[in-house]
Image: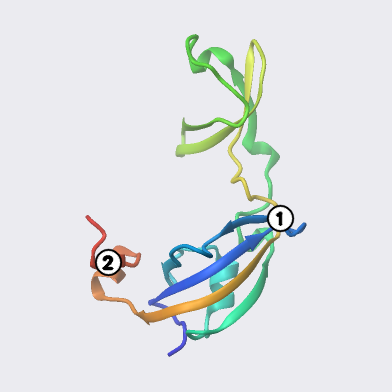
Amino acid sequence: MSIKENSVVSIHYTLTDNDGVELDSSKGGDPLVYLHGAGNIIPGLENALLGKATGDSLKVEVAPAEAYGEYQDGLVQSVPRNLFGDDQEIQVGMRFQAQTDNGPMSVVITDVSDETVSVDANHPLAGKTLHFDVDVAELRDATEEELAHGHPHVGGSCGH
Protein backbone atom coordinates (compact mmCIF):
# COMPACT_ATOMS: atom_id res chain seq x y z
CA MET A 1 0.00 0.00 0.00
CA SER A 2 1.24 3.49 -0.81
CA ILE A 3 0.18 6.91 0.45
CA LYS A 4 -2.79 8.29 -1.45
CA GLU A 5 -5.71 10.63 -0.81
CA ASN A 6 -7.65 9.52 2.30
CA SER A 7 -4.77 7.50 3.77
CA VAL A 8 -4.06 7.81 7.48
CA VAL A 9 -0.30 8.22 7.65
CA SER A 10 2.06 8.05 10.63
CA ILE A 11 5.47 9.64 10.16
CA HIS A 12 8.50 10.36 12.26
CA TYR A 13 10.24 13.54 11.20
CA THR A 14 12.91 16.05 12.04
CA LEU A 15 12.42 19.61 10.82
CA THR A 16 15.43 21.91 10.36
CA ASP A 17 16.01 25.36 8.90
CA ASN A 18 18.55 26.37 6.22
CA ASP A 19 21.29 26.49 8.88
CA GLY A 20 20.58 22.95 10.05
CA VAL A 21 19.05 24.13 13.32
CA GLU A 22 16.44 21.64 14.55
CA LEU A 23 13.04 23.32 14.82
CA ASP A 24 10.89 20.31 15.67
CA SER A 25 11.06 16.53 15.80
CA SER A 26 8.95 13.51 16.63
CA LYS A 27 12.00 11.30 17.24
CA GLY A 28 11.84 9.70 20.67
CA GLY A 29 8.08 10.37 20.86
CA ASP A 30 4.87 9.47 19.11
CA PRO A 31 4.76 9.82 15.33
CA LEU A 32 2.77 12.57 13.64
CA VAL A 33 -0.49 11.06 12.37
CA TYR A 34 -2.40 12.87 9.63
CA LEU A 35 -5.10 12.33 7.00
CA HIS A 36 -3.52 12.63 3.56
CA GLY A 37 -5.33 15.08 1.29
CA ALA A 38 -7.20 16.86 4.10
CA GLY A 39 -4.74 19.73 4.52
CA ASN A 40 -3.57 18.46 7.92
CA ILE A 41 0.10 19.17 7.05
CA ILE A 42 1.84 21.73 4.84
CA PRO A 43 1.31 21.18 1.10
CA GLY A 44 4.98 20.74 0.19
CA LEU A 45 5.47 17.88 2.64
CA GLU A 46 2.14 16.29 1.77
CA ASN A 47 2.99 16.34 -1.96
CA ALA A 48 6.40 14.75 -1.32
CA LEU A 49 4.82 11.92 0.68
CA LEU A 50 2.31 10.97 -2.05
CA GLY A 51 3.10 7.46 -3.30
CA LYS A 52 5.49 6.56 -0.46
CA ALA A 53 5.04 3.36 1.57
CA THR A 54 5.61 2.14 5.11
CA GLY A 55 9.34 1.98 5.76
CA ASP A 56 10.25 4.64 3.20
CA SER A 57 12.62 7.42 4.23
CA LEU A 58 13.00 10.73 2.45
CA LYS A 59 14.50 14.18 2.74
CA VAL A 60 12.27 17.03 1.62
CA GLU A 61 13.05 20.71 1.09
CA VAL A 62 9.91 22.85 1.20
CA ALA A 63 9.92 26.43 -0.10
CA PRO A 64 7.91 29.06 1.82
CA ALA A 65 5.13 29.11 -0.80
CA GLU A 66 4.47 25.39 -0.11
CA ALA A 67 4.87 25.76 3.67
CA TYR A 68 3.71 28.74 5.74
CA GLY A 69 3.88 31.36 3.01
CA GLU A 70 6.15 34.30 2.39
CA TYR A 71 6.76 36.77 5.20
CA GLN A 72 4.31 39.67 4.79
CA ASP A 73 5.35 43.07 6.12
CA GLY A 74 1.68 44.08 6.07
CA LEU A 75 0.96 41.63 8.90
CA VAL A 76 3.15 43.67 11.26
CA GLN A 77 1.56 46.69 12.85
CA SER A 78 1.84 49.05 15.77
CA VAL A 79 -1.18 49.36 18.04
CA PRO A 80 -1.83 51.66 21.02
CA ARG A 81 -0.40 50.26 24.27
CA ASN A 82 -3.67 50.98 26.10
CA LEU A 83 -5.45 48.25 24.07
CA PHE A 84 -3.70 45.73 26.33
CA GLY A 85 -4.94 47.24 29.61
CA ASP A 86 -2.96 49.11 32.21
CA ASP A 87 -2.47 46.21 34.61
CA GLN A 88 -1.16 43.70 32.06
CA GLU A 89 2.59 43.22 31.73
CA ILE A 90 3.50 43.10 28.04
CA GLN A 91 6.79 41.55 26.88
CA VAL A 92 8.41 40.82 23.53
CA GLY A 93 7.68 37.22 22.50
CA MET A 94 4.25 36.97 24.13
CA ARG A 95 1.47 35.53 21.95
CA PHE A 96 -2.09 36.81 21.88
CA GLN A 97 -5.28 36.04 20.03
CA ALA A 98 -6.37 39.26 18.28
CA GLN A 99 -9.93 39.79 17.07
CA THR A 100 -9.89 41.06 13.47
CA ASP A 101 -12.48 41.70 10.74
CA ASN A 102 -11.44 38.28 9.34
CA GLY A 103 -11.87 36.49 12.69
CA PRO A 104 -9.34 35.60 15.39
CA MET A 105 -5.66 35.82 14.49
CA SER A 106 -2.61 34.76 16.49
CA VAL A 107 -0.05 37.55 16.94
CA VAL A 108 3.31 37.80 18.67
CA ILE A 109 4.63 40.94 20.37
CA THR A 110 7.81 42.14 18.64
CA ASP A 111 8.36 45.53 20.32
CA VAL A 112 6.95 47.46 23.29
CA SER A 113 7.16 51.17 24.08
CA ASP A 114 5.25 53.40 26.51
CA GLU A 115 2.72 54.31 23.80
CA THR A 116 2.69 51.42 21.30
CA VAL A 117 3.02 47.68 20.96
CA SER A 118 4.21 46.12 17.69
CA VAL A 119 2.51 42.84 16.78
CA ASP A 120 3.34 40.36 14.02
CA ALA A 121 0.61 38.08 12.63
CA ASN A 122 2.95 36.11 10.35
CA HIS A 123 3.36 32.41 11.18
CA PRO A 124 6.70 31.95 12.99
CA LEU A 125 7.97 29.90 10.02
CA ALA A 126 6.70 32.26 7.30
CA GLY A 127 9.38 33.06 4.72
CA LYS A 128 11.55 30.11 5.72
CA THR A 129 12.66 27.18 3.59
CA LEU A 130 12.04 24.05 5.65
CA HIS A 131 13.99 20.79 5.57
CA PHE A 132 12.30 17.56 6.64
CA ASP A 133 13.93 14.19 7.28
CA VAL A 134 10.97 11.77 7.26
CA ASP A 135 10.38 8.08 7.96
CA VAL A 136 6.97 6.62 7.06
CA ALA A 137 6.03 4.54 10.12
CA GLU A 138 2.50 3.31 9.37
CA LEU A 139 -0.18 3.60 6.74
CA ARG A 140 -3.85 2.59 6.46
CA ASP A 141 -7.09 3.63 4.79
CA ALA A 142 -9.16 6.19 6.68
CA THR A 143 -12.50 5.21 8.20
CA GLU A 144 -15.73 6.87 7.08
CA GLU A 145 -15.85 8.77 10.39
CA GLU A 146 -12.30 10.06 9.91
CA LEU A 147 -13.17 11.20 6.38
CA ALA A 148 -16.29 12.98 7.65
CA HIS A 149 -14.28 14.72 10.40
CA GLY A 150 -11.29 15.53 8.17
CA HIS A 151 -8.66 14.12 10.52
CA PRO A 152 -7.48 10.75 11.89
CA HIS A 153 -8.83 9.32 15.12
CA VAL A 154 -5.85 8.05 17.05
CA GLY A 155 -6.92 5.56 19.71
CA GLY A 156 -10.31 5.07 18.04
CA SER A 157 -12.03 8.39 18.75
CA CYS A 158 -11.54 12.12 18.60
CA GLY A 159 -13.91 13.15 21.37
CA HIS A 160 -16.47 15.14 19.36
How packed is label 2: few (under 14 Cα within 10 Å), some, or many (20 or more)? few
**Would you name the residue on which mark 2 appears?**
155
What's the amino acid at mark 1? Answer: Val
Dot label at residue 21 = 1
> How far from the left and from the top, in percent, is residue 30?
43, 64
Per the model, the C-alpha gap separating discs 1 and 2 is 33 Å
Dot 1, crowdedness within 10 Å: few (<14), some or many (≥20)?
few
In the picture shown, does residue 95 fall above or below 28? above
Residue at 61% in and 45% down: 124
In the rendered image, which quarter is residue 134 located in?
A: bottom right
Which quarter shows the C terminus? bottom left
Q: Is residue 36 above or below residue 23?
A: below
Q: Residue furthest bottom?
A: 1
- Image quadrant occupied by the N terminus: bottom left
| Amino acid of disc 2 | Gly
Residue 146 in the image: x percent, y percent? 29, 69
Q: Is residue 39 above or below residue 10?
A: above
Q: For the point 70% across and 54% down, which residue is it?
A: 128
